[in-house]
Image (tube, rainbow, N blue to C red):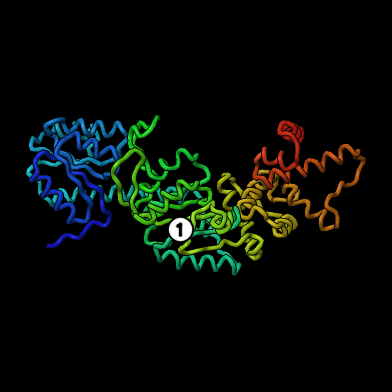
């Protein structure tokens, strides 16, 4: 009976000093659908394992130049995550226990039966698949998904329909749109609807990685590749192998890494920093940016060939102001989701007047701004309802704007100094909101010193 090939191909290293055993075993493993290499001594094995390329190592315990257990110890101390299957003709319970203590996955005795070896490899493949699935499930549980909200706007429905179509393909996707419009949520939805939904979904903010560490972060490194590289690092492409890699803020990649990324997309292989061996990777790329990437291509800031590689399928996310029909539902959606995150025993209702102000707001910060504002309102609310008093100045100013004035000083025996201070508070708070809390950017926008800004913020607390 012909055995079906494994659904999850592994990178396997066979280590045995007998050439006939190596070759027969390697042939059987390759026929089962795995990729395999083989060596005849411990030093060669350690050199191969240092690359971090192998999922599994089938290693003889008795080698001419080193004990097989020492290979396991050295690999584990270097941070190599390879699963070891130990084989020996000198079977004993003590040897098996020692192998397990060193970190071996399982124990085989010679003479080997190919069926036993392949069964163990299937178990390892299933084990690694379950680990990846658990990581994926944790990411689902830890974050609220935008597509849990059923959109009423035509603009967003078109995006969701396109996501369903795109999920059936493996082409690269480029998602564009303003900051906070939900690009990462749509990337996750594409993955969840695809055949790769059980495989890893690895997300990275390209603008948050220091340029000097980018190559190592993306492609990994071997031990000793540079100062401080005391362990093997897999890299993002290895972590996402078989699944999806989401490159958020892809326009922030420096040109030097753009060249290497293009090579990976074309050749489907990576080389870790400091390593000599290349490894095949099977990764679907979804990229996103809030910048005008076409203008960046024209100016030479972004490679044209990489742009076309990423832009096989283009999706444009609508701004929140373009989906006004969704605003009432989104207000209540975020009240529920953020209320659960805050562990509120009872989630407040919202006063109709306060809800009206939220619906009329322009939302320049899109979904992210609404999420943050609802969270703030839930924290500020004293009673069973969110009222206008619980909303920030950016929202409540709309009341005075509706009456024809951009600033309403109110009625009372307030001095000019107090009225000016109130207006100054509103201006500063609005600038902080626009700059997403970046104090240096706020100081620059208002043309005041950073120390002055901090002093005024403290005075207004």
Query: Can residue 432 be seen in this snapshot?
Result: yes
The residue depicted at 35 percent of the width and 47 percent of the height is 238
User: In the displayed structure, would residue 383 be above or below residue 195?
Assistant: above
Relative horizontal placement of residue 104, taking residue 429 as reference (left or right): left
Relative horizontal placement of residue 288, taking residue 11 as reference (left or right): right
The residue wearing badge 1 is: 305
Relative horizontal placement of residue 92, taking residue 210 as reference (left or right): left
The residue closer to the viewer here, 442 or 195, is: 442
Relative horizontal placement of residue 460, taking residue 96 as reference (left or right): right
- Rendered location of residue 390, percent (x, y): 72, 47
The residue depicted at 24 percent of the width and 39 percent of the height is 48
- Secondary structure beneath label 1: helix
The residue closer to the viewer here, 255 or 205, is: 255
Q: Considering the image in quadrants, where does the C terminus appear?
A: top right
The residue depicted at 33 percent of the width and 37 percent of the height is 222
The residue closer to the viewer here, 395 or 93, is: 395
**Could you classify mark 1 by the number of other residues whose Cα lies within 10 Å: few (under 14), some (14-19), or many (20 or more)?**
few
Q: Considering the image in quadrants, where does the N terminus appear?
A: bottom left
Which quadrant of the figure has residue 61?
top left
- Rendered location of residue 358, percent (x, y): 70, 56
The residue closer to the viewer here, 202 or 392, is: 202
Query: Can residue 461 be seen in this snapshot?
Result: no
User: How many dots with numbers?
Assistant: 1
- Rendered location of residue 3, percent (x, y): 16, 59
- Rendered location of residue 89, percent (x, y): 8, 38
């Amino acid at each position: 009976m012909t055995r079906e090939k494994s659904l999850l191909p592994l990178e396997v290293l066979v280590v045995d000093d007998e050439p006939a055993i190596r070759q027969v075993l390697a042939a059987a493993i390759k026929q089962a659908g795995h990729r395999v290499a083989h060596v005849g001594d411990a030093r060669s094995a350690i050199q191969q394992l240092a690359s971090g390329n192998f999922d599994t190592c089938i290693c003889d315990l008795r080698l001419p130049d080193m004990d097989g257990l020492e290979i396991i110890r050295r690999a584990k101390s270097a941070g190599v995550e390879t699963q070891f299957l130990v084989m020996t003709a000198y079977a004993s319970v003590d040897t098996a226990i020692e192998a397990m203590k060193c970190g071996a996955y399982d124990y085989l005795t010679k003479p080997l039966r190919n069926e036993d070896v392949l069964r163990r490899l299937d178990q390892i493949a299933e084990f690694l698949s379950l680990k990846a699935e658990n990581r994926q499930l944790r990411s689902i549980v830890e974050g609220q998904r935008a597509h849990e909200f059923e959109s009423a706007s035509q603009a967003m429905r078109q995006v969701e329909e396109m996501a369903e179509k795109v999920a059936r393909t493996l082409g690269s996707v480029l998602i564009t749109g303003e900051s906070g419009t939900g690009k990462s949520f749509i990337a996750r939805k594409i993955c969840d609807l695809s055949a790769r939904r059980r495989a890893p979904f690895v997300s990275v903010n390209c603008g948050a990685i220091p340029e000097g560490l980018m190559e190592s972060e993306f492609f990994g490194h071997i031990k000793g590749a540079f100062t401080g590289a005391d362990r093997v690092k897999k890299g993002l492409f290895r972590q996402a192998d078989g699944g999806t890699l989401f490159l958020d803020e892809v326009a922030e990649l420096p040109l030097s890494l753009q060249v290497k990324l293009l090579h990976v997309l074309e050749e489907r292989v990576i080389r870790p920093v400091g390593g000599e061996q290349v490894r095949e990777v099977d990764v679907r790329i979804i990229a996103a940016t809030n910048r005008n990437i076409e203008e960046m291509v024209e100016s030479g800031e972004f490679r044209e060939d990489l742009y076309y590689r990423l832009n096989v399928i283009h999706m444009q996310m609508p701004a929140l102001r373009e989906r006004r029909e969704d605003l009432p539902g989104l207000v209540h959606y975020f009240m529920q989701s953020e209320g659960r995150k805050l562990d509120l025993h009872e989630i407040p209702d919202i006063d109709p007047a306060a809800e009206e102000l939220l619906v009329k707001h322009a939302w320049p910060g899109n979904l992210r701004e609404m999420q943050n504002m609802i969270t703030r309102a839930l924290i500020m609310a004293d009673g069973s309802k969110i009222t206008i008093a619980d909303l920030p100045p950016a929202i409540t100013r709309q009341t005075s704007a509706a009456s024809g004035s951009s600033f309403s000083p109110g009625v009372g025996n307030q001095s000019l100094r107090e009225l000016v201070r109130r207006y100054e508070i509103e201006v500063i708070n609005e600038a902080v909101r626009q700059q997403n809390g970046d104090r240096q950017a706020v100081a620059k926008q208002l043309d005041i010193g950073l120390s002055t800004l901090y002093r005024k913020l403290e005075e207004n607390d």
